[in-house]
Structures are given as structure tokens and as C-alpha cells.
Amino acid sequence: MSRTLRPRRRLLAALAVLSGLGLVAASPATADTGLYHEQYRPQFHFTPAQNWMNDPNGLIYYKGKYHLFFQYNPSGNSWGNMSWGHAVSTDLVHWKQLPVAIPQDDQEMIFSGSVVLDRNNTTGFGTKKNPPLVAVYTSAQKASGKQQQALAYSTDGGTTWTKYDDNPVLDIGSNNFRDPKVFWYAPTQRWLMAVSLADQHKIAFYSSADLKHWTHQSDFGPAGATGGVWECPDLFPLPVDGDPKQTKWVLAVNLNPGGIAGGSGAQYFVGDFNGKKFTSDDDGTTYTPPSGTVTQDFESGSFGDWTTTGNAFGSAPATGAVDGQSQVTGIEGKAFADSFHGGDASTGALTSPEFTVTSNYINFKVGGGNHPYQPGTVIGDQPTPTGETLADFEGSTYASPIGDWTTTGDAFGTGPAQGTLPGQQQVSGYLGNGLANTFLGGDAGTGTLTSPTFTIDKKYLDFLIGGGYHPASSDAPTAVELIVDGKVVRSATGSNGEALNWSSWDLSDLQGKQAQIKVVDDNTGGWGHLNLDQVLLSDTQAKPPSIETGVNLLVDGKVVQNATGADSENLDWASFNTTAYRGKKVQIQIVDANSGGWGHVLADEFTTADKPALNTTQRAHWLDYGADFYAANTWNDAPGGRRVMIAWMNNWNYGQAIPTTPWRSADSFPRQLSLKTVNGKVQLIQQPVGELTTLRGAGTKVPSTRVTNTTTPLAVHGSTLDLQADLTPGTADRSGLDVRTGAGQRTRIGYDTATGEVYIDRTASGATDFDPTFSGVQRAPLDLHGGQLSLHVLVDASSVEVYAQNSRGEQVTLTDQIFPDPSSTGVGAFAEGGTATIDHMQAWRLKSIWP
């Protein structure tokens, strides 16, 4: 269970309606604001009636019911007061929410864990005739921050729970020891626990005879993806190709951040388990990149014909860690480029001469700070814009050259702040001594700061801004607004950082107008404040300076692709796709423009090749390549030995900002798991549980549809759909299906023939502006080998789940949240750069699981 992101904010009260379920000539959506039918409310995914939910916990099948416990805040719509919520189902589809099962108290919050049926009453909590259900959970101590493993038990089928008097049962004195998955291991007649050593990227295995006394057996890891803390492990056996005599074990490990799509993610390992130790068939540590021609490996002892600026890279390549630097790993050969000369405070660039692209890829290794290139930024300090100062906040009051700015509320105090306020992280980037800073008293303060009226007589309004990312369109903004004729005509917000950077509005269309600037802090959650300085009308557009640390590909002096480190001294592989630039002149530039923490870059082994090199994250085995599949776990004791998985359908990057109320977060639709041998390798295969078919209503077969450089509407409509189709990409560069179309919106599910990837594009999917990390494209590698792509797509009011498979049986899955307008219920076929065909398409509307 992730506790690495501090609560941030509530957002966008849901206003209107849930789209009607239409399939073929659907009628317009009608207003329905009752419970379970609010805007964005999933209609066939589990959600609590109200309040915040995250990780699924304690999954167990018992006496005809699937029990779903979950991390739950009984008191609000954001993370906090962690307790175990509870729901049950007889079919994995229709759910009944029950009262809170295990509540927090003054001493502990109830973090993630598992539930087992103690059939032999090894704990003594029940009787042989009435064996207890036992919850093994992480007790998060409020006073110390320690995470310990504890027990609670139920003798009435999970309705009421009693905490064990002698808790905790396992304590190693760690603040990062959590999420136990417990099961009975028949060969040794003992209980086994897989539990996360989160910050060590390890899963620890323990055994016990009675669930009360635990003995450490072994650890697994680090392995696979390690870009964030490891959480919510699960370990279970599955037959390979349906043969019970050939069994492998699957270890699921969730991590945050560091997921394949950014933020939260879920990976898995296939291997063997002997009751004490798990051994992975492929832990990702052995890798040979594609062969190619090395163009720069820094082994000559000099930078050769590459030129340097600044002092960060020193006079020659490094041959190990430089003064003050931790150990550097992942070097190819002996030498590499290292911008830590002089520490993080130094800056500079290392640039190759121009060369002609003759290959499809440029592969290289990169490490150091995670500070990506941001479009529109410029390297080096830029002159401060000049013009008419509207406010510089240097005085003791909000007086300015154009008159006094006026305040409401308590966030702004009686005058500007003199830098960082008590309890605030270090504020930087402001000019002089003062700035407007609404962290006065913490994030809880709210208010406005409004300028006198002024005449717009210059082309730009430039200002320095930082603080929370809460756009003016949200219900609780932290924003700077330009008001003309009583209307907000421009707005800007921070980026969830205390560093102020330049922003600029082009006012060409507003010349001569009377205007006011209004600074609004209406947010009381995390990052619920704003920093502002140096507001001026100018004929010069302010350009924010770059704070990047990374490697750039330059065409005509402009950055067209970039890669950065992962806040690590380990160099890992990266790749530029240069197919589009073959025959053109390009340059490689290694840039350190950052003087803060992790403000340096490492680079090595630039190689031209026909195939891309894959980094550790790309080589990991992912349960799902979408942005919203986390804390994945499976049911204990499911009938018939079936293994069913469910996950939290959200992401810690923006989980507390998604625009839903009175609930926040849903679970993925349950998936049945199997292991199959595909091209000589054992792969985990996932499919929606068969009970999905009980929700199908009217269905239709869609005729084969051929599209060329266009988008063609299909005779299918609905906000909750089950779609199955085969795609022949043909000559198209990109092709596939659009869902939830209308009102200028669409969620695109496509195949990119150039990269060999299935993707979900949610950039135009509806509401996306509630967090800067939400809008984007998620991709999953899947070579079609010249064949068709089979798609199975589940569409709900606020999500899409894609099961994609090639003709050889290789599979990828992608799960994304979306927040479309209720009226956007169309489906279409599209092709770009050629012709593609949608074949054998079958569509069903899905009935709501709610009353």
C-alpha cells in the first residue's frame, strides 16, 4: 500500500449526469444524480458508496462469497484514517458494501494485508467446528511511524473483528515493512508470509505454525523495476498450460513510483518456490543490448571533438565517482561523462558535432538526476524582463506602483512573505526579498489577492509563479487569474513545487482593455498554496530557464527527443528512435542545467543500432502497462483453484485529484490468471472473469470496416461497453478504435506499426487538467509479426481496460481512467498514414451492477 504521496487536494465536484447505456442508435443521456449514478461513477466496477478507497486487501472466498476488504477512509474523500472497508459478492460482479470491518484507533492505522481461513484453528481464536477468519495486517503506529504486522480475527464469517491482544506478531523496527500476503503451504504444513521491505526493494518470506510466531526464511530482490518503493506482494502457484504436474510460482510486486507508465505500477516474476525461497526465471539483471556501432564511449581519455560549456563536466571523462559523489554503477568500460564535478551546484553542457543519421536508433546509457527537458525552457539565465511593474512584493504591505492590492481571507496575511514560511519546504526562484506566499499557517489558509485596475498597453504579462497545481477551472484552485470585463481570460497555476519560474501571457488581443490580476488560493489540501513574484507588463516574453539533467537529440538546434536519469548513480540504457531523421544532420547534447538536489547527469556508450536498447523498467514483466493498475492482489481459496486478481484502478501521481465525488477510486474488473508457454517462454495471461457475460445486454455485430487516413463512426454507442475486435493494421502507421467519442472528446486505443506498440491515448478523453501528469499516452510493446491484433476492451463511465493479443498468443493489458462528458458515448475506427481494417467486431452494452 502506497503511503509515499502526501494528500494533495479535492477537485471538481461532479455536476451532472451519467450517460445512458446505448448500443446502436442510443438516446441522449438523461439526468440521474442518485447514489451510484453520479457523473463518472463506474457502473460495473466496484466503488464504495462514498469516501476514499485505495488498495484491495484481505481477498478471500468463504462460504459462497468473495470478500473484498480495502483501504478506506471512513471520514473523507482523500487518503487518511486508514481502516479496512468491506464488500462481498457471490459472482465477482455484483457487490454489497458492508460496515467498516477493522477501524483505525488512536494508536494505529490499519494498512494493507490479507485474510486466511484458519481451518485447523492453529491460532486458537475459534474452534475446530467454527474455525476463525484471521486478518494479518500492517499496523501503522501513529506515534512512532513504525510498521508492524498484527492480527485480527472473526468467528462470524467476517462481519465483526477482534484485534489480537498480543499484537504485534512481527516487528523488525522498520517504518517500511508492510503489506503481508499470507497463505497455507501444504507441503510443510505451515503458514507462509510474503511481506515488503519497501525501501530496500525486497520481499521477505516468513513461516509460522500458528500465525503468531514467525521465522524469517529468505529475501527476494532487488530485481526487476526498482524505481520506487516495493509494496503489496502476492505469491501463488499456477499450472503451466493447464498441466497440474508442471507448476510455476508467480510473485507480484507493486511499486510506486517507477511504474512503466509513470507513477504507480505492478510487475511480476515467474519462477520456483520451495517453501523458503523464491527463485525467478528472469529477474532482469542479465541483459545484452542490440549490437551496433559505438560512436562515443569516452574511453579515449578526452571528450574528443565534443565541446563543453560550463564547468560541470570537468576537463575530461570521469573514471569513477568524483569528489563528494556516491559510487557510480552501470559504466560501460572505464570512462563516462559525469557532470558532478564541483557537486550539484555546477552546470554545463557537452555537445557532439553534427552527424548524419544512418540508423533507426541511437542507444546510450544515462543516469543522475530525474529532471526532464521541458518544452519552452531555455538553457542559461535569461535577463529579467523589463517593463511596467505591477507588483514586486518588496514592501511590508501589498502596496505597489499602481496602488494597493487588496486581500480577503487569511492566506496572504497583512503583507508579502520574506521567503520561506514556517513548515514550508525551501522556496527559491523569487527576486529580491519578498513574494506573495499563501503558505501562511500552512496549506489550510485560503483567500484572494487582487490588484488595482490597470490598462493593458504592452504585449505580455510576465510573472514568477510556484506552489500547488490546482487550475482555475477546479473547485479549489491555487491560481493567478487575469480578469477583463468581469471574466477570467487567462490563468496559471503552480506545478507542485516551491521553486518559482517565469510564466508569460500573450495579451495581443487585449490591448487597451482595463484589467485586474486576482491571485486565488481556495485549496486546503496538500500543495494548497501559491507563490507569486515580479508581476510586470512587458514587450518581452519571459522564458523559463531549463532545470534539466539529461541527454537531448537536437535537429536544427532544437530538442526533438530527450532522456533523463532516475535520481540514481546507476547508468541505465535509453534509446532515441531516429527513423524519422535518417539522412538528416543531428547532434547529441548532454545537459546539466540544474543546481539543486540530484542536479547532475551521467552518460556513456552512444551506439547507433537497428533496434532499441531497453532499460530496466522496460525489461521488467508488467501486469499492466496502463497508468491505473496498482496494489494488484488475488483471492485466497477461490473455488476450483481459480486465481482471480483485482487492483486499485488509480495512480498515486494524481489519485487524490481525480474529479469524483462523493467517492474517490474504483477497483479494476476482476481478472482470471493463467500461465501459458508462448514462443518458448512462460507468460502470465489475463482475461476478464467469465461472469462478465452476465452483464451483457443487447449486442451487435459490426461489419468489417476499412478506413484510410480518417476516422469512421461505428454503429455502436454507450458509456459501458464490452468490445471484441480484430485489427489488421495494413499500411497504416497507426490504427484502432476510438471510444467515448463526442463533444470533441475521444479515448484512442490503437496500434503503432512503427514502434510495435499497443497504446491508449487519453489526451482528449475529457477532464484532464486536474493534474499535470494525467494527460498522456500509455504504451505496451507487442510485435504482430505481420498478423492481426485481437482486442478485448471494457469501457465504463470513467475507465477503459484493454486486453490485446497477437496471433502467437502474446498478450499485454492496459488500464486507464478517463473522465469524459456524459454525452460522449460514440465508438469509431481510425487509421493514420494508410489503410487499416477492423474485422470481426462484436459489441455488447453492459448493465449496471447498482440499483
Image: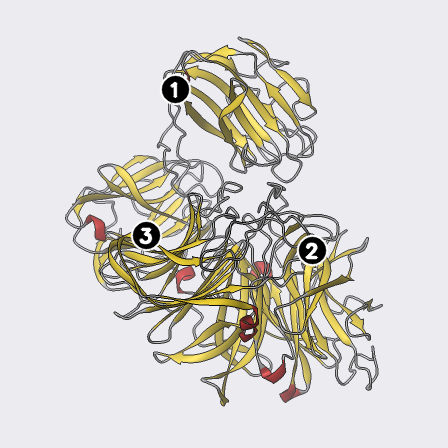
Can the viewer see residue 327 in this picture? yes
> Is 306 on the left or on the right of 165, as rendered?
left
Q: Residues within 10 Å of mark 3 (few under 14, many from 20)?
A: some
Q: Give the mark, 3 or 1, whose residue is nearer the N terminus.
A: 1
Q: Amino acid at mark 2?
A: Ala
Residue 584 image position (x, y, % from top left): 16, 45
Q: Give the mark, 1 or 2, whose residue is nearer the N terminus.
A: 2
Task: Work out whether residue 9 or residue 799 is closer to the camera in this orientation and state it.
Answer: 799
Query: Splitting the image into 4 quarters, where does residue 712 fall?
Result: bottom left
Secondary element at image label 1: helix
Question: Height in image: 121 above or below 391?
Answer: below
Can the viewer see residue 212 in this picture? no
Q: Amino acid at mark 3?
A: Thr
Q: CA distance from mark 1 to mark 2?
A: 47 Å
Residue 576 image position (x, y, % from top left): 29, 52
Report the number of numbered marks: 3
Q: CA distance from mark 3 to mark 1?
A: 34 Å
Q: CA distance from mark 3 to mark 2?
A: 38 Å
On the image, numbered disc 1 is attached to which residue?
509
On the image, numbered disc 3 is attached to which residue?
711
User: What residue is at 36 percent from the left and 30 percent from the top?
Assistant: 380
Q: Residues within 10 Å of mark 1 (few under 14, many from 20)?
A: few
